[in-house]
Image (spheres, rainbow, N blue to C red):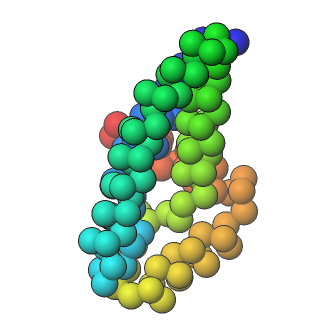
Amino acid sequence: MATSCALLGKLCLAASFAVVYIHSGEIFPTTMRNSAMGLVSVAARFGGICAPFIVLLGDTVPNSQFTVFGVMSITAGLLNLRLPETQGKPLPETLDDMLDLKVNNKKMAGKEKIKHLYSLLESSDV
């Protein structure tokens, strides 16, 4: 169970890391994009600072570091699914444009959003 959780967590972590820098540049409006990307970078560095201490947790409670990393990574992967779709849409220029992305994303139901993501994956060349 611990190995499965660690592997699934690593998968979600890799996907989340790729999404953070690419997708966040498309979500934030031009007026605050630099500051927002700096904040995203700070959050990533904070995670990097905490990682060795989570690994040391495994010395106290065996295999607990895998559980912590797995749960955090799966949570990050699931939260990425809540980000608005930006494909084919212009970059937001103002805060109102950014809020419109969020409002339009909420109109799509959960199952419809997953079907849309699968259709995008199938149509891509990756």
Res 80 visible: yes
Place residue 83 in its image quadrant. bottom right
| Foreground of the two, 120 or 92 | 92
Q: Who's the residue at 39% across and 38% down the image?
A: 48
Q: Quadrant of the N terminus?
A: top right
Q: Quadrant of residue 64?
A: top right
**How far from the left and from the top, in percent, is residue 70?**
60, 28
Residue at x 46%, y 37% (from the top left corner): 50
Q: Quadrant of residue 69?
A: top right
Q: Residue furthest left?
A: 34
- Going by the image, does 58 lie left or right of 125? right
Can residue 5 be seen here?
A: no
Say which residue appears at 41% left-offset and 47% top-offset.
46
Query: Does 61 sit above or below residue 106?
Result: above
Q: 79 above or below 70?
A: below
Compared to 109, does 104 lie above or below? below
Q: Residue furthest front?
A: 60
Name the residue located 66 percent from the left edge and 71 percent from the top edge.
106
Provide residue 89's location: percent of width, then percent of height. Answer: 39, 73
